[in-house]
Image (spheres, rainbow, N blue to C red):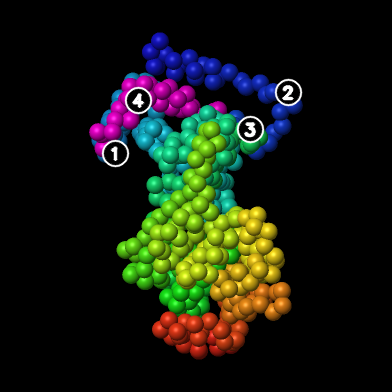
Amino acid sequence: MSLSDRIAKAQREQAKPAVPAQGERSTASAMRRRIAKRDPFAEVKRLVHAQLVEKVGPQLYDVDMTQSELEQLVRASLQGAISSSQQPMSGSDRNRLSQEIADDILGYGPLEPFLHDPTLTEIMVNSHDDIWIERDGQLSRAEATFADEAHLRRTIEKIVAKVGRRVDETSPMVDARLADGSRINAIIPPLALDGSKLTIRKFAADPFTIEDLIAFDTLPDNAARVLEACIKGRLNVLVSGGTGTGKTTTLNVLSSFIPDNERIITIEDAAELRLHQDHVLRLESRPANIEGKGEITIRDLVRNSLRMRPDRIVVGEIRDAAALDMLQAMNTGHDGSISTVHANSPRDALGRVETMVMMAGMDLPIRVIREQIAGAINLIIQQARLKDGSRRVTAITEVVGMEGDVITLQDVFVFDYSAGYDDFGRSLGHLRPTALRPRFLDRLSDHGVQVDPGLFAEGQYAR
């Protein structure tokens, strides 16, 4: 049977009225599925795609063929396959169909337009027919859908295979990254009950600078100048915040202040940091193989990094017993290290680190752990995402020391929530200094870094 005959048969089947399953509810998801079934070109797309893969499939993996040559081959074959379908369609429909099939073969299908959209920060696939996007901190449902669950699974497998990871029933969760540094998380059945889930955290093609954070009102100019001095003065800094508050972006910006003549080692689960210094060594953890062997954890990498003569250690996120090794590194001459942690306040961040140190199983007294923390961490930067979607630094807090069994903190900058919101729901608050002189100024001076005391003056706010 020719391609045109198969299309005609499929369209006759598609024209038959659909009989809803007994008890089917008229949900938004069911409505979208029924609308998708009415797409007059759905079957054409499926058959042309199958014909094209059959024709050029072996050449898709030809290592001697450049990406440009592969794209030319696919698009030339695609035009011929669509023409042979003899399906009446307008020029715009033909171009759309051609682009969608090319995206499936050369890229990541319906996700391609979103991946190339610089205004998006997050792509969330809840099911094959339910895709959400985040723009300017606000969520909205996207028009695009995958053809079915199998289509979504193929796309997930294609993404993770490019970075040497796998996802299947024996390993149904995976963290990976795209070529542009975007971070992805995928989870599939049987853990995901309603179909595979895919989350993509996008990062700007050109990494943000401190000027960008000031322009976004993430923090004011005076706070930015203080943080720059703290990094150059080799303070150990912990960036704290919830999911999606911008911790990694801030970590990347802070790392840009490290001098070019220092040896920097970055340690991450999925490599996201993009440092432009001359002497950067990037390490990435590795999950266990299908036999449950070969796992390399963040803790293993932190321990190994100590033997690599680092000037600075930058850990993407502390989330387990690696906290103990990180604290020991900070306390044994590796000043100026930076990391992030999930917590809702500076005090909570210290509690999280304390809990993770206890996970190491060393059975250390609480006071000893807290003394290690107080001696290692000098500064905590707290971030939050406000209800208007903006990401703000809400506190810059100094770790002063110990009073009895309690770690003492001193806020250097705090966010003023009292300003409220304007008529458009945008926050009017700003990060303001507390007018307290931080104790780390003497340490910065010892490293030849001078800070203008006027930056801490009460009521000071500068864009």
Q: CA distance from mark 2 to mark 4?
A: 41 Å
Q: Residue at 64% across / 36% down in the picture?
A: 191
For residue 321, which quarter of the picture? bottom right
Q: Earlier in the sequence, mark 1 or mark 2?
A: 2
Q: Earlier in the sequence, mark 3 or mark 4?
A: 4
Residues rendered magenta in the picture:
37-66
**For mark 1, what is the residue?**
67
Do tag 2 and tag 4 residues touch (Cβ < 8 Å)?
no
Do tag 2 and tag 3 residues touch (Cβ < 8 Å)?
no
Q: Could you tell me what secondary structure mostly forms the magenta stretch? A: helix
**For mark 3, what is the residue?**
190
Q: Earlier in the sequence, mark 2 or mark 3?
A: 2
**Residue type, mark 3 in image:** Pro
Q: CA distance from mark 1 to mark 4?
A: 15 Å
The label on residue 22 is: 2
**For mark 4, what is the residue?**
57
Q: CA distance from mark 1 to mark 2?
A: 49 Å
Residue 444 seen in this snapshot: yes
75 magenta-colored: no
Q: Residue at 47% across / 24% down in the picture?
A: 43
Q: Closer to the camera, 285 or 79? A: 285
Q: Closer to the camera, 458 or 110? A: 458
Q: Residue at 41% across / 71% down in the picture?
A: 257
